[in-house]
Image (cartoon, grey):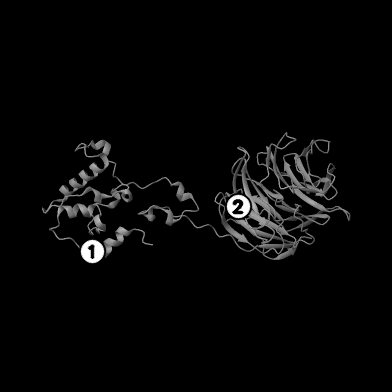
Amino acid sequence: MDKDSSHHHNHNNNNNKPSPSSSSSNHVKRLLNFDHYTTPSKTLCSDRFIPCRSTSNFALFDIPPSDKDTSSSSSSTAYNSLLRTALFGPDAPVTPDKRSSRNIFRYKTETRQNMHTLSPFLQHDHALPHVNYTTVPVVKPHRKVPKSPFKVLDAPALQDDFYLNLVDWSSHNVLAVGLGSCVYLWNASSSKVTRLCDLGIDDYVCSVEWAHRGAHIAVGTSKGKVQIWDASQCKTIRTMEGHRLRVGALAWSSSILSSGGRDKSIYQRDIRMKDDFISKLSGHKSEVCGLKWSYDNRELASGGNDNRLLVWNQHATQPVLKYSEHTAAVKAIAWSPHVNGLLASGGGTADRCIRFWNTTTNSHLSCMDTGSQVCNLVWSKNVNELVSTHGYSQNQIIVWKYPSMSKLATLTGHTYRVLYLAISPDGQTIVTGAGDETLRFWNVFPSPKSQNTESAIGALSFGRTTIR
C-alpha cells in the first residue's frame, strides 16, 4: 500500500513544472489541491497544515479567476483570507489576534497513543482516509513460544479423571504428582524422585496442593480424608476428617486449608487448631472440582459439577456471589495476580467457554468460546497472559494475551485430555499432565527480567524419564 500518496505524486511529476505565467487562481487551486492538482517538487505549502482536509470542500468557495501574476506573498494572503472566511465566517476581522490564532494550523505529531492503536483489532481498512501510517507506532511482534515441550516425564497410572487435581508445583521447585495410591515428588532442580506416601491398596490420591511457603503438602484421598505431610521429612503431620466422599479439590490460604469433595461440601480447616475443620460451606449441588483462593486471601472461588461458580469471603458460610452462566462443570479457576478481583473460569465439554468476572463490582466482563472442554487455567505472574488446557476434542494448550484474548500459541502433543496443569515458581514454565500418562514441560512465559533468562528447570537436558 502506498503510505504517502502526496510524496508518490511529487516523484512522478518532477518534469511537469508550471510555467511562470500561471495565474494566481491556479496558484490557489494548487494550494487547495483543487481537482487533484499535483503539487510541484518545490513545496509551497504542505498539505499537513490544512486541518480536517477530508471533511472540507473548497470547491464551494468559487474563487474568481485572475490573469495577473501574483507573488507568493499575495497568494498566501488570498489563501489565508479564504481559510479565515471558511473558519470564522464572512464577518471575521481581517487581522485576527496572532496570539490566539498562530497555532491553529500548526501540525503537531500526536505524542499520546490513541486508544485505537492499543486495540488488537485495529485494521487499516477502518482507519480514517488520508492517514499517514508512518506516524502509527510500530508494534513489536509477539515473542515466539516454543511449540514443543523441552522435557517429558512418564507418569504411569496418572488418572484420566476430569474431577481430580493431581499435579502441583511448590515454591521450592518440587513437583508433586498423585499416581494411583502414591504421591511422588520430583525435584525440578536435581531431577531427584522421592515417593512421599502410599495410601494403600484400597485408597487412591484425588488431589495434591502445596502450602505457599515451607514444605507442607495437603493430600486429598478417595475415602474423604485430608492428610498434611512434611515433604522435607516424608512424614505425615495429621489426618483430618469431614468429607463423606472423595476430596478432589484443595486450596491453601496461609494456615487455612480449604477442601472440596464429591459430597458437595467445602470445609475450611485451620491446621493450627485441633478441630478437623472450623466451618462447612454449603452451596454446590454437585461435586466440587475447582477451588482457588485469591492472592489477597480475601475470597475463595469454587466450581462444581453443577455448572456453578461461587465466590465466598473469609467468614461466610454462604456464597457472596453466584454465577450460573457456564453450561458445564467448572473445574478451571484462576485469579489474576495483576488486577484485584479479576477472576477467570472455564467450562467443560458442553460449555467450552472461558469467562472473566470482576468480583469487586460483581460483573461479567467477557466470554471466549475456546472450541473444546476447558480443564485448567493459570495466569502468568510475569506478564498479563494466561494459559488454558483443554480436553474434548482438541487436547491442546493455549497461551492467551489478556484482555484481547488473542492466541499467542497453541501447543499440542498430549493424546488425552490435558487435565492437569501447574506453573513453576519463577513463572516461566508450565507442566501439563494427561491420561496418556505423561507430564510435559513447556516454556511459555518470559522471566520477570528478561525473556532470555533460563530457569533452573529450563537448563535441564532434553530427554524422557519416568517419575517413579
Q: Which residue shows up at 18% across the image and 46% down it?
A: 78
Q: Quadrant of the C terminus?
A: bottom right
Disc 2 residue type (three-letter): Met
**Which of labels 1 and 2 is toward the front?**
2
Disc 1 residue type (three-letter): Asn
How many numbered discs, if any? 2
Q: Nearer the viewer, residue 150 or 99?
A: 99
Q: Which residue shows up at 27% across the image and 65% down it?
A: 12
Residue 196 spot, x, y in % from top left: 81, 52
Reply above or below: 169 against 271: below
Q: Quadrant of residue 321?
A: top right
Residue 150 spot, x, y in % from top left: 65, 62
Q: CA distance from mark 1 to mark 2?
A: 54 Å
Q: Is residue 427 left or right of residue 305?
A: left
Q: Quadrant of the N terminus?
A: bottom left
Say the numbered circle drawn on residue 245.
none
Say the numbered circle drawn on residue 368.
2
Residue 38 spot, x, y in % from top left: 25, 59
Residue 446 visible from this viewpoint: no
* Precedes in sequence: disc 1 or disc 2: 1
Q: Is residue 250 left or right of residue 411?
A: right
Q: Nearer the viewer, residue 149 or 456?
A: 149
Disc 2 is placed on an element classified as: strand
Q: Is residue 432 left or right of residue 77?
A: right
Q: Residues within 10 Å of mark 1 (few under 14, many from 20)?
A: few
Q: Quadrant of residue 133?
A: bottom left
Say the numbered circle drawn on residue 14.
1
Disc 1 is placed on an element classified as: loop
Residue 281 spot, x, y in % from top left: 77, 38
Q: Nearer the viewer, residue 365 or 224?
A: 365
